[in-house]
Image (cartoon, rainbow, N blue to C red):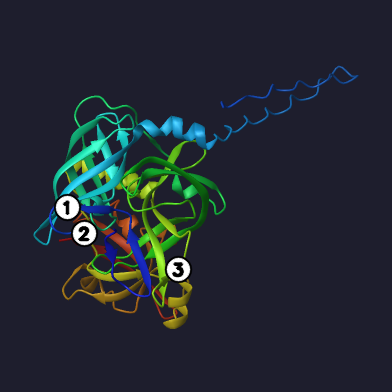
Amino acid sequence: MTRLARRAPLIVCLLVVGVALAACTLPGQAGSTPVPTATPLPAATAAPTAPPSPAAAPRDLTPQEVFRRVGPAVVTVVDLFTENGQSGTAYGTGVIFDARGYIITNNHVIEGQRQLKVIFQNGAERDARLVGADPITDLAVLKVDGDVPGTATFGDSSKLEPGQPVVAIGSALGEFTNTVTTGIVSGLHRQLPRQDEPDLEGMIQTDAAINPGNSGGPLLNLQGEVIGLNTAVVRQSQQGANVAEGLGFAVPSNVAKVIGAKIIADGKVVRPDLGATTVAVTPGLALQQSLPVQQGAFVQKVAAGGPAARAGIQAQDVIVAVDGKPIDEENFLDFLLLAYHPGDQVTVIVARGQERQSVRVTLGQAP
């Protein structure tokens, strides 16, 4: 059974499976082409040398080859947890991304953890400890001691295109470990609502089959690179029936790389605080609010006396750029702010009606 985010009409199912311990079940190679040489002209003047042909792109791997390459770096995460005073076991998936034994997974896999274990592809078990977690991006980093059987390489999620083939690996239902499924990138820059946390932004949509237990498992391109971490599926309930299929979502690798590095360095993610509640501008929101822009961060609320308020930012403004970097589908506001620290000053461009204003904001520290 999954733990659910309770927000209608979309039912966002986090991909962790729990079972009862007590009385309850809680929810090839890059080839190079020879450079041609020019044929001499009849006159004594030789023709200019033709430019080198570009090196051939690496060939796509088959799903079998992707699994052989990355499978040893994928683990089952076992979380003995306590929730609402009751004990249970949750299963998820993780990816070894550092040879020192660091594993990245979803935060919701390890919530309430009392004891953590990982199971390697060969069935060997090892104790793990939590290094740190970031509920806002739903990511967490674990650590195991000793040698690891493999590590995965993270790719550049900004280069993804809809229709691109992908492979998912995970512990489906917590029992069917090392399950491999295939699909495509169905969409990019999706936003998923959550009740108790900020919306998940910039998510990769895929139709590769992912199930409870897949949480934190890799979504891979055909070069064997991790381009996302599978996190949730969406079910749309209609008169008690689940009518939506093939709607899976993954945290982009570019976000996971930044968050993972920050957790390893500091044990947590220290976020600068803008002092404003924002939501990504969508076409629907732009139409509803008669916004002058189609992209940016719409300011819903400004904290009294906070950094945004002191800089003159108001509710109903749209933040369109930070230090010259435009806020768009790829670079949403929270992601751009990860490059800064509390106390940093940034230049924020705000759209207010048809006007543009440039303001300086001294960032605070998020609680």
Query: Which residue is identified by label 1?
Result: 88
Query: Which residue type does callout 1 highlight?
Result: Gly
Query: Which residue is identified by label 2?
Result: 26
Query: Which residue type does callout 2 highlight?
Result: Leu
How dense is the environment of label 2, judged by Cα within 10 Å: few (below 14), some, or many (20 and up)? many
Tell me if label 2 and label 1 are in contact, CB under 8 Å. yes
Q: Earlier in the sequence, mark 3 or mark 1?
A: 1
Q: What is the CA distance from the residue labelled 2 to the residue labelled 1? A: 7 Å
Q: What is the CA distance from the residue labelled 3 to the residue labelled 1? A: 43 Å
Residue 295 marker? 3
Q: 286 or 150, which is in the foreground? A: 150
How dense is the environment of label 3, judged by Cα within 10 Å: few (below 14), some, or many (20 and up)? many
Q: Quadrant of the C terminus?
A: bottom left
Q: In the picture shown, does residue 1 fall above or below 157? A: below
Is residue 212 something one can see in this rendering? yes
Badge 3 marks a residue whose secondary structure is loop
Query: Which residue type does callout 3 highlight?
Result: Gln
